[in-house]
Image: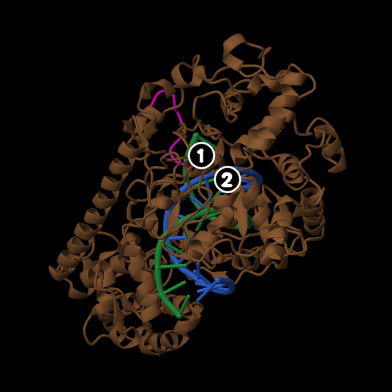
Chain colours: A brown, B green, C blue
Amino acid sequence: PAGDCAGQTMLDTMEAPGHSRQLLLQLNNQRTKGFLCDVIIVVQNALFRAHKNVLAASSAYLKSLVVHDNLLNLDHDMVSPAVFRLVLDFIYTGRLTDGAEAAAAAAVAPGTEPSLGAVLAAASYLQIPDLVALCKKRLKRHGKYCHLRGGGGGGGGYAPYGRPGRGLRAATPVIQACYSSPAGPPPPPAAEPPSGPEAAAFDRRELPRDPDSLPGAGPLYKGATLALPPLPPLPFQKLEEAAPPPDPFRSSSGSPGPEPPPGRPDGPSLLYRWMKHEPGLGSYGDELVRGRGSPGERCEDRGGDAAVSPGGPPLGLAPPPRYPGSLDGPGAGGDGDDYKSSSEETGSSEDPSPPGGHLEGYPCPHLAYGEPESFGDNLYVCIPCGKGFPSSEQLNAHVEAHVEEEEALYGRAEAAEVAAGAAGLGPPFGGSGDKVAGTPGGLGELLRPYRCASCDKSYKDPATLRQHEKTHWLTRPYPCTICGKKFTQRGTMTRHMRSHLGLKPFACDACGMRFTRQYRLTEHMRIHSGEKPYECQVCGGKFAQQRNLISHMKMHAVGGAAGAAGALAGLGGLPGVPGPDGKGKLDFPEGVFAVARLTAEQLSLKQQDKAAAAELLAQTTHFLHDPKVALESLYPLAKFTAELGLSPDKAAEVLSQGAHLAAGPDGRTIDRFSPT
DNA sequence: CTGGGGATGGGGCCC
DNA sequence: AGGGCCCCATCCCCA
């Protein structure tokens, strides 16, 4: 009908003036009230609330994040809270507030207000083209937008790290020099480049490249920014003061979580650069470096989008993870062993990092800091192996090969474990004593009917068994979205995340100290109460923490003959044999009983094993009366201990030593320890 | 300088 | 999923 046509025509031509502006206004109004906000953005210690749709419509990077998560963690090396505040304001208003003004509004300490350069960096990092353009425009208007390596302008600002960049680096103007301008103070914390070791870290702060500086390049060249010292506290909602944010991983429903900003789909993107860490930066920053691009996340999927960010730069693969526990070196915290850097293993002279405490970087010597030009034309680099490729397609194919390789390896490892188990060789990891748990007809068999096919450990319920079996997987299913470290249990990963986020929900009422775990607080509270419930059965020393008692007992075990039975139950030296301090004064049967009692106490501490502890005590009371029985009981005691799953690693030693003593192939051993 | 203890952080893993 | 505990490592202090 003619009316319809007319109506259609009118619809095509109608436009409500200011509609978009009004819409934005409403959205911003809602944001300020938190109305319908469905995402929380964590930047360092500040929380921001926003709408997923708005973020997704404004930033390609944020879009990629909000798809999977309700809680986003932004790299505060790239985006400070103050800067993100400006960015968020821009997203919702289209206006870029003056940095100083915003800083004043945010009550930021003088001199720490975000510079335009920092906003540009953040905009580039977050892939907000409009904001990038706006920043550049403003910088150019003020004559502050200058190319770092082309014509100086650094004015004593940031020196190029290592040596003058060439190739890709030199071809691309970066904006560090802008920080030297009076109106754009360097980002906190240092107003001037530091000297000494700090300078290395300082110089490495790399801002995103000018998105327009390379033909077809995505805006997101993301340098391997290392850890910047934290910004001063900002008057945003602090995490520790706020209600606990939703678990970012719970909400992601198994998604690998945020990944580094993908490149623009319409052209080749610049690769992420993975730089070697520097000493003295701390593990946190290093982990951030490793997390850049957290390559393994995508590869875990093994799905259609695995390994490579859609249309973006290749994210690479995580190197094959290594087993926990078995290979942990003495490095700090045992962290980062998953990714052992070849440069570290070879002791790179330019990286005199102490063992541990820093990134165990990707084993790619080409990625070493200061050698960016070594890729030549092969700009698409596989993170784990360091191979460069001239095109994303070729890299994708290469990455696929990695995936297949890992899968094949997984299969082989699994087969090897099974074969080893079948051959009675035990698993390639973990204590050999684990096998006793599966002793047919043993007590452990009754208590723990669900046995692991790979290592013969047994469990009370199938869910726990499934959980345990994950420890045998080559691929750890739960990667940290910040540092890329992978975990076998989601809970461990979320707990790990708390350390990144500085979430310490458990506060001590007495001193205000905060902890990430309830148990830590419980431990800590004993300091204030003076309670020392853990007593050394050898010397009578008392301890507030169980682990310190255990540590102490090892000291007893170190000396002389005590070592043999010192392994017993992992709790101390052989009773009856004086320790190095001469404090061990127990007679032999009493000593065995003490061991049994300690074991029982250990079991009792594990709430679930109270009954077993009582049984053990009942069985061992007669030790006091008959040394012979005591001696003969060593082996079953050790076996029993191991069967009950007490300290599996030690259980291996227990069984070994117990067997040695009880079977008595070495008569001298028995005589030596026999009181008669 | 060394060793031991106190205290803390982080990961593994079981319940 | 969260709690709890074990283990390792580390730092600091003190004798």
Q: Is residue A566 left or right of residue C11?
A: left
Image x and y of residue A186, in percent: 72, 26
Overall secondary structure of the magenta section: loop
Q: Nearer the viewer, residue A404 or A30?
A: A30
Residue sitting farthest toward the left: A423
Residue lying furthest front in this view? A2
> Which of A448 and A117 lies nearest the eye of the viewer?
A117
Which residue is disc 1 drawn over? A264
Residue A353 shown in magenta: yes
Chain of residue at mark 1: A
Residue A38, position as x, y percentages in the image: 68, 62
**Residue A583: mark in rendering:** none
The N terminus of chain A - image quarter = bottom right
Q: CA distance from mark 1 to mark 2?
A: 8 Å
Identify whether A393 is placed above or below A616: above
Q: Is residue A503 visible?
A: no
Left or right, A285 with reference to A34: left
| Quarter of the image that includes the C terminus of chain A | bottom left
Which residue is rendered at x = 46% and y = 21% of the image?
A168
Query: What is the quadrant of residue A414 in the picture?
Result: bottom left
Q: What type is the residue that disc 2 sits on?
A: Ala
The segment highlighted magenta reads A348-357
**For this view, does A216 lie left or right of residue A380?**
right
Q: Disc 1, disc 2: CB below 8 Å?
A: yes
Q: Position of residue A149 (x, y in %)?
A: 57, 14
Query: Which of the labelled discs sits on residue A60, or is there none?
Result: 2
What residue do we see at 75% from left, 44% from top?
Answer: A85
